[in-house]
Structure formats: structure tokens, C-alpha cells
Amino acid sequence: MFSVPQSSKSEFLDKARQAREERKGLKEKEKSAIHIQALVRSFLCRCRLQKEIRKEVDDYFQVSETGTSKRNALSIFKIARKLLFIYRQEDKMRFEKLCRAILSSMEVENEPKVWYVSLALSKDLTIAWLKQIKDVLWTCCSLLKNLKVSIHCQCQQLCFYSKYLHFFTFLNIMGHLNQKGFYSMLQILLTNGLARSKPSLSKGTLTAVFTLSLRPVIAAHFSDNLLRSFLLHIMSVPAVVYHLSVLTPECMATIQTHDLLRKFILFLSREEQCLDICVCLEGSHTLCLLGNLIHLGYLNEKVLEEEANHFVKDLTDMLSYCQRYVSQKKSNLTHWHPVLGWFSQTVDYGLNESMPLVTKQLQNLWGVSIIRTLFNDVLSKKLESQEPTPPPPQPSTSQNNLPVKNLFKRAFQKSASVRNILKPVGGKRVDSAEVQKVCSICVLYQTALSTLTQIRLQILTGLTHLDDLLPKLWAFICELGPQGGLKLFMECLNNDTDESKQLLAMLMLFCDCSRHLITILDDIEVYEEQTSFKIEELITISSFLNTFVYKMIWDGILENAKGEKLELFHSVHGWLMVLYERDCRRRFTPDDHWLRKDLKPSLLFQELEKGKKRAQLLLQYIPHVIPHKNRVLLFRNIVTKEKENLGLVETSSASPHVTHITIRRSRMLEDGYDQLRRLPVNSIKGVIRVKFVNDLGVDEAGIDQDGVFKEFLEEIIKKVFNPALNLFKTTSGNERLYPSPTSYIHENHLQLFEFVGKMLGKAVYEGIVVDVPFASFFLSQVLGHHHSTFYSSIDELPSLDSEFYKNLTSIKRYDGDVGDLGLTLSYDEDVMGQLVCHELIPGGKTMPVTNENKISYIHLMAHFRMHTQIKEQTAAFIRGFRSIINPEWLHMFSTPEVQRLVSGDNAEIDLDDLKKHTVYYGGFHSSHRVIIWLWDILSSDFNAEERAMFLKFVTSCSRPPLLGFAYLKPPFSIRCVEVSDDQDTGDTLGSVLRGFFTIRKKEPGGRLPTSSTCFNLLKLPNYSKKSILRDKLRYAISMNTGFELS
């Protein structure tokens, strides 16, 4: 019964609440309206006031400009106060007029009341005037900060405001400006004007701005705070010192007058100050500061010489800071920098345009002037002279393409009388001040090499420019420690002290620079002129490096090496391998120089079997310390193991799969190509049985027990490498083989090259030696040496064309203007009667060869001749060859050693070894008189060339197997024959007995010895006289009768 009254009450309360809210809303609206009205009135009032003030200011300047009224200091002060009160961006022109009015007041003579600064003397206005001049000056700074120096009118304003600031700045006001960011403003201004390829600041503006920046520092007597600000904001502007030296030499004189470089060096020599500067600047600007300091050092040689230690320390610390953020590869956290490479700090890309100038400043560090100053202790020492003593004669190899007659005599006459051979002698304390200084300098340059990754080659080239620096640095290294040489540095590897790290850094720098030097020197400079190093010193150095690397590996240091030690290893190893490869190309070391006599091959092979890390590393990095014969044996063992793993070897439980092919003798190459090119790789590696048929399809007699396949392989290789086929060409001079650039006349020439690669790989795989002499540059490509950082095309060029190499190097040595020769960056070639122009680079035929690009031209030409021209052919050949021979297996051989692996040993034929491994048939035996005559004729009557012809007559290769005749497959055999080859039906009981007892059916004096090269078989008639045997054998081998004639 209470529901109705309850409802009425709720409605009443709701209405009352709504009424209150409406009244409250109305009050708020009324209040807001009043507030808005007040704001509008205030705004309108301000606008009116601003308009009135602007009109008053405009009228003031208009009256002044007409000259109807004379401005005094007080009127300028009052109008300035009003303008500053209402100053906005739109008032920039009025503000400029104000500044001009103030400057004009200062130019009036003999009327102090007109001078604006006179108000500072008024007791009532001093404080107000000081505040006003501070506001005016900071407004000038703000305007300067936003001006665009590339716009002409704004450039004029920049010049005006900078001069205005220069006129009115003094100590009290400068302090105020510094607190508000005066140096930051100047940094932005200078960066905008100078961080470009061509500066947009005029001489006057730059002078004014730099003087402004220097004024607080001088006024504060070079306090740490002001020096810090100056270094952070002014000296970090890209190439500011370069622009000052070019545009305003007066400013550079000021820097020298106040000895600023010394103050900078000493300030940064405190580690915490240097770190603070680097952290504040980050990488890009730290590099700019570094460039400016180096430039100052270049211009102030005296200060640099006196403060060398501190200067080196400062630069090392700054480079080390940058090095923390240098990355080896791209990632989401890295940015590209044109000098530092991939960099994990933020990169200011606005500085990229100025980086060439910064790089130019940095180059002074490895320029002749600074190098001579820093390395003065090393360079000032004279290398003692000595009387010449003739060097031992060095054997030349078939790889030597330059004339070597009297080479060492000429080299000796030119350089041996100059100084002693530098060898480790010891005697210099490593803790002496001199050694510490040289070490710290080496650390600086080594840090630069690892930090400034994109200009690393420039640094190395600069350090190798002085011919005497590296020899004298080597002499310095030789004097270190009690005995000098290896022992000291091996001890350093086991110590983790700063002293040890510095000594190792010196060795690392020496190796990096020397490796670079030898890489860029040609053979004439190394062997004949002996630039920088004498041949005997290279022998000593290579022995030192060889032992150092060997010890690092064999003593287990490399296994756990990280960071600096690992870098040191790669540096020393790189220098070692450059010397080794040059020695392989053209010998300068004595026999067995590279071998380690304290390393037992049997122990090494045992450790390889057990998977020992040090043995694997030794084989990976310095296989040359193992005798060549042992490495060949290892290679054969690797091949045998693979055959076993692939099931290609006959076992008691299984037989290998055999591939049968049928070949027509008249179309041997075509049939072999068609049937073998589609075979899987493992089938080619396996057993292949060949059946020869004649043109009528009739089978030839005989069963292939590897001999027929050997004959087939030899014949195939002989055909494809015949230059008449135009798949391969011969080099000029020594007639060595390389792919023909015009092989494309064959429709399927690339498939043929891949097939040839497989066939040669099969021969090496089976240990069949074939008489195919390759050009060494081509074998280097097969081994992958051309992918090495240190590979130089020009060094390999003599193996292609020694005359062409001489012509190119004569351009390098040409003293006049190369442009007069009329050469372009192109190569003209006669291709099958037509002159074809090959551009070495795009547009090369229109680009002249000059003194500046002649080195590039030489390398481009060499690269074109040996790589570009035959790129596709070489790639196809390598693809086929590597499908059979794993490239890692050949890593343990040098280029000449791979040639020996293909074609056999180039040593003298060991007749005793051949006799020991000869098998006799048909009644012959080792004591048979014909056999005794044969061996006596070979040893006594035949010369080395005839013995090689004899071996080729029987085996098809003039060189013996690398591991001796025990590894000749099938074994060398001699068989007594009674009839001609076409009547020969094999050995019978009668023929064997007659041969054994020297019973002849008839006198065989009219018949010649013959051979079956597929079986390495000599077929020898049972001659009655030794003289007949000698004459017939000599005739047979000279005519190379083989199967053709008997």
C-alpha cells in the first residue's frame, strides 16, 4: 500500500537533482564565457599592443633611415626592449634592423652618448642593459642555428650575425651563452657549412665563427670544461682543420700561437677525459675529431715529436673505442659507415658527404711525415754495410718464366753490399723506453688496421711506402730479448701481460705490412731489384714464420686461441703463405727449407687417424712442412678409404659394380663422351671396363684388366688436350696448356670441358700419370688460389705469356706520361681473322690509361687474359674435376705439386727402383743376358732425356710415379717375343723355354722392340748382340713406335 508514495518521492528527488545540475551547468557556462571573453580581450589587447609596438618600431627605423632624426643610445635601448618583449619569428627583419642600428651607433665618432655600450656605464641601466644584450646575443645565436648556409641571402645574414656576436661577446656574456648552448649552436652552424664536399662558409664567416668559438677557451685560460666543450663541439666538426688551413691561415696561426694541439693532447691523455669525449661523440664524430687531431699533428711536427707518446696513446684510445662497435658483418643492429664498415652505433649519414675529406686527414697518419716522426727511433738507425759474398747458386724450376741467368749475381751486386743480412741476434731489453715506444706505435697502427676496415689497404700501402721502414723494423725485432727471434715471441704467447700483447702487436703489424708489400711487388722488384728485403732476409724471415706457425699449432696454442692471438696467427700465417706461394712459383729458398725435420710423418699420420686436432690443423694450414712423398701417400690413402666407403673395392663378401662401355677406335672421343658423361659420379669413380671394336663392330681381342681402360683414358686425354682440337691452347715459350678462349667454336664446348675435368680427375683418382703440362695460372684456379685475398693476377701472368708480362711491367716503370702511349682500358685481340675490342671495364675503350690508373690497367689486363677470357671454360673444367677429386684433398699441395700429381715426378728416373719392381714374361728373368744388356744400356749408354723417352715409350708418360715404381699400375713388365704383334698369340711353353735358354727360331735383328702402354709392357725380341738391342731400342723410342711399327 506504500508503492505509490515511494514512486512519487523518487521522481521528486530526480527532478531536484536535475535542477541542481542545470543551475550548476549554467554557472559553469557563464564562468567559461567570462574566461573566454577575458582571454579574447587579452589576446586582442596583446595583438593591439604588439601591433602598436611593431608600428612604433617600424616608424622608429623608418625615421632613422630617412636621416630626419638622430638615434641615441637610450632610444635604441628603449626600442630594443619593446621589440624583445613582443619578438616572434615574423620579427626577424625588425631584429636585424635593430642589430644594424646598434652596430651603427658604435661607428659614430666622438659622441659617446650615441654609443650603445655607453649605457653599461649608467648606474640605473647597467643591469637592464646587461640583460638586454644577453637576450639580443642569444636571439642572434638562435637565428644562426636555423639559417641555411646554402641560400645566398641567409648566408649574408649568417655573416652579419656572426660578426655581431664577435663584436659584443666578452667574458660575462660568454658565460651566459655557454650555459644556454653556445657551442652546440656553433657546432650545428659549422657542420651545416663544412660537412659537404665544397664548403659554403665564406672566409670572413668562418674566421668570425672560429674566433667566437675560441674566445671563451682563451678567456677561461684553457680550463678543462672549456677545452672539453671545444673538443666536443668544434674539433669534432668534419675536416674543420682542413677548411681552416685552406680558407683562413690566420686561424691556424692562432692555434699554433696558443699551442692548442699540445693542450688537446695532454687533456686527452687522461684516460677518463678521453673516454668521456668518445662516449659523448660516438663513432662518426669521434672519427672526425681523430682526423682533425691527426691533421694538426701533421701541421705541427715539433709538437708531435715532443708529445709523441701522449699523441700515440690518445689516438690508440680513440680508435679502440670505435673498434668496440666495428662489426664484421651486416645485422639488424649495424649501420654502414664508409670508413668503419658495419658499425653497431648510430651513424650520422649527414656526414657521409664530408667523409672523403676526413679520410684525407686520416691518411696523414700513415703519410711519410708522421711515419718518419713516430718511427724516428727505428728509422734513424743505419743498417751496417758489409763486403759482398757470392750467394749459393739456386736451381731454377720449370715454373720460372723470367730469365734467371745471373739473377742472384745481379741482385747481389745491387743490394748485398748495402747492408748485413738481418738475422735474430738479441740484446735489447723489452722493458726499455725505446722498445715500449716502438711497441705502442705499432699498437696504434694495428688498431687502425682493425678499426678503419674500409681503408685498410690504404693504411698498408702508406706503411710500406718507405723502403727502409720494414727492414729496419725487422732489424729491431731481431734485437729484442736475450737471444732474439722466436723464443721471445713464443713466451709472449703464453703470457697475458700488456707488454706481451704490445710485442705481439709489433710482430703482427710487421707481418701484415710485409705481406702487403710482397703481394704488390712484381718478380723483378722481388728477385732482381730486391726492394725493401734482400733474398737472404726473405729466407730468414720465412724460416722464422714457418717455425712460429708450426709451434703455435703443434704446441696446442692455436686450438684455444681467441681474439688477438687468433688474429696474430692468421697474420703470421698469411705472410708465410705469400712467401711460400711465391717460392713455389719461382724458387728462392734452399732445398728442404720448408720441411720440419723434428716432425715425424708417422706420428702425424697416427694422430690424424685418432682425429687429433693439432694434426688436422697442421694439415690444414702448413702441409708443406710434411715431405711431399708423405703427402702423396696420404692422398692415396684418402682415395683408398673413399673407395672402401663407396664399395668400389673388391672384398671377400662383395664385388664392386662394373660399368662396361664399348668404344670404336676411330671415334674414341665421341663414344667416350656419349657414354661416360651421363654416368653418376660414383660410377665414374668405380671400375670401368672398356671393349674396343673396329669400324665394322667386330670386337678386338683381349680382356680389360685395367690396362685397356688406361689406354682408353690416355688416348682420350691425348686427344682433348691436343691444341689442334682448340679446346686447349699452349702458352708462348714453354708450351703449357690452358683453356682456349675460342673453344666456343665447338657447340657443346662447356660440356666437353666438364667431361675433360672428370677424365683428368679419374686419372688422378686412379693414380694414372698422364703427360699433360698445365700452365701454372690455370692450375692455381683449379686449386682455388685465385679466391685468396693475397692472390695477384700479375704475378701469375708470366706463366701465360712472359713477353706480355714484361711489356705490362714496363708500363708500370714508365717514367714519362703514360697517356702519351695512347692506351685505353681495353684489349684488342685478333679472333679468327677479326679484330675484337674487349673492354676491361664498362666504357673502357674511351678511357685513357694515365699515370694515376696504370696500376689498375696492368691488373685488369692480367685478370682479363687469365680469368675473364676463359671464365666459363675454367668453371666447367673445375666442376668436372672436383666432382671426382675433393678440393680439400688437394689443399695439401702447391701448384707445382699438383702438376706432379697429374704428370708424375720430374726427378731423375731411378733405374734401381724400376728394376726392383719389374715383372718378366716369355722366358725372361733378371739374370737373362738381354735383360742385363737392357739395364746396362739404360744406365750407361742412354742419357736422362733418352731414359725419359724410354719410360714414355712403355708407359705413355715420361715421368716416374710420385711414390716410385712400386705404385705403377699395372706394374712395369718385359716380355720376350718371337713374332710380330699381329702374329703374337701369347706365351706358350715352347716360347717360354726358348726365351729362357736363349734359343731362337730365327735371328730377330730386323725387328724393333714394341710396347703396350695400356699394360706398361715392353715387348723385347731375344737379340743376339747388345749393340743390336741398343740401336733398335734407341730407334724405337725416338720414333715412338708403340703399336704402329715393328
Image: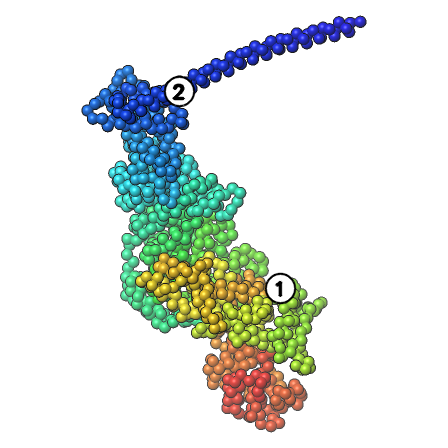
Which label is found at residue 642? 1
The residue closer to the viewer here, 429 or 893, is: 893
Vertical position of residue 150 compared to residue 68: above or below? below
Whether residue 903 is visible here, answered yes or no, is no
Q: Would you call the spot at circle 2 few (<14 residues within 10 Å), some (14-19), or many (20 or more)?
A: some
Q: Position of residue 749 (x, y in %)?
A: 57, 69
Q: Amino acid at mark 2?
A: Gln
Which sits earlier in the primary sequence, circle 2 or circle 1? 2
At mark 2, the secondary structure is helix
Vertical position of residue 241 compared to residue 629: above or below? above
The residue that mark 2 highlights is 50
Vertical position of residue 941 compared to residue 123: above or below? below
At mark 1, the secondary structure is helix
Whether residue 745 is visible here, answered yes or no, is yes
Q: Would you call the spot at circle 1 few (<14 residues within 10 Å), some (14-19), or many (20 or more)?
A: some
Q: Residue furthest right?
A: 1
Q: Amino acid at mark 1?
A: Glu
Q: Position of residue 698 (x, y in %)?
A: 69, 82
Which label is found at residue 768? none
